[in-house]
Amino acid sequence: MTVFVACALGLVLVALAVLVRPLLRSAPVAATALALGLPLATGAAYMALGTPAALDPAARTPRSTPATPADMAAAVEQLAAEMERNPGNIEGWLLLARSRKAQQRYDDAERALEQASRLAPDDPDILVDLAETMTLAGPSRVIGPEAVALLERALALHPRHQRASWFLGVQAIQAGEPARAVALWEAILPTVDAATATALREQIARARAEAGMPPAEDAPPAAAALRVRVALAPEFAGAVDDGDTLYVFARQPDGAPMPVAATRLAVATWPVEVSLGDADSPMPTLRLSDLDEAEVVARISRSGDVAAASGDLESTPRRVRLGDEPVPVEIEIDRRRP
């Protein structure tokens, strides 16, 4: 309390020195009134509008600072309580659902996802999460009619939704319809990454055998839709260290900045040649082979971050037509981002 008062008086004296000194010669009466009135007015204002009790350590209560949870379970309970007070926070419901699933409290996770689904009824990811959690909450782990309806709605909203198709395929196997599972899973096979595709092909092979269908023909590896040779302009030869990250993107010309194919690698020698194809697409809804033309650009990131940053080196974007022959496209890293 004493320290606070001393500091406050010091600030008032500084203010008086600035305000009163110019008035001493021109208006001495006003200067005297200001010198006497400013400290009194400041003190009265603080007593009326401030919190004097906060200066007394004994008067402070822990209510202003939420208690730190002792462990993760306590933190989840705090989150659950917060969601009851703030039910319009969709991200909070999704976090609570994930936390309850990690605790294997599937009924509680289902209720949290139901709340999230009410806030975002057309979000296919939430619909699929709700269907999965609903199944986990059941005693038999069988995908029931209500979960199937959610999955079918998600697939209607997003016809190539991988998880919705996967779970509907599982439900088809449970229902004794392996041929339907084959159709669902083969439809998403071109959209998944290489590791997932390997596991999915095994499931498809089992379903085909169960349905009495012939084994799937091994498709030859798809040729790269685009080969790119990236050179480094001589003036930047000393600006790149071994191990710096090179990103090569192909994106829609005059379209969204999100690439339809992308790859990254650490560089040591130049030029560098890379191949871009459908397997390099970060978006299952759009592949490189869906385009007639693409814009190709290369960028060196010193930080390794995929997001472009000031000082990164990059090529001038080049627009190319995607033909049947994967002729290498020549681009050069020749400028620095401002």
Image: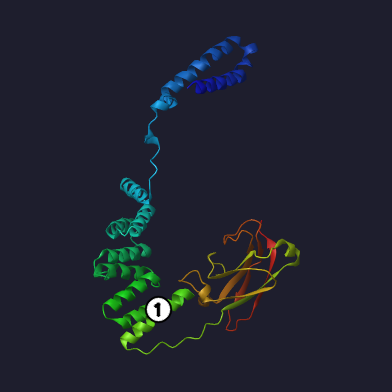
Q: In the image, is residue 130 above or below residue 326? A: above
Q: State the scheme by which the image is colored.
A: rainbow
* In the foreground, 226 or 128: 128
The C terminus sits in image quarter: bottom right
Q: Which residue is mark 1?
A: 187
User: In this image, 88 relative to 250: left or right?
Assistant: left
Q: Is residue 124 visible?
A: yes
Q: Residue 191 placed where, x, y %?
A: 45, 75
Residue 324 picture quarter: bottom right
Left or right of residue 30: residue 207: left
Q: Is residue 95 left or right of residue 314?
A: left
Q: Residue furthest right?
A: 235
Circle 1: residue type: Ala
Q: Nearer the viewer, residue 195 or 250?
A: 195
Q: Determine the residue positioned at 68% across, 65% down.
A: 242
Q: Is residue 312 above or below residue 169?
A: above
Rendering coords of residue 267 (x, y %): 65, 68
| Towards the viewer: 317 or 336 | 336
List x then y, in percent, for residue 199.
42, 77
Horizontal and vertical percent position of residue 256 = 53, 65
**In which image quadrant can residue 224 be found?**
bottom right
**Mark 1, secondary structure of its residue:** helix
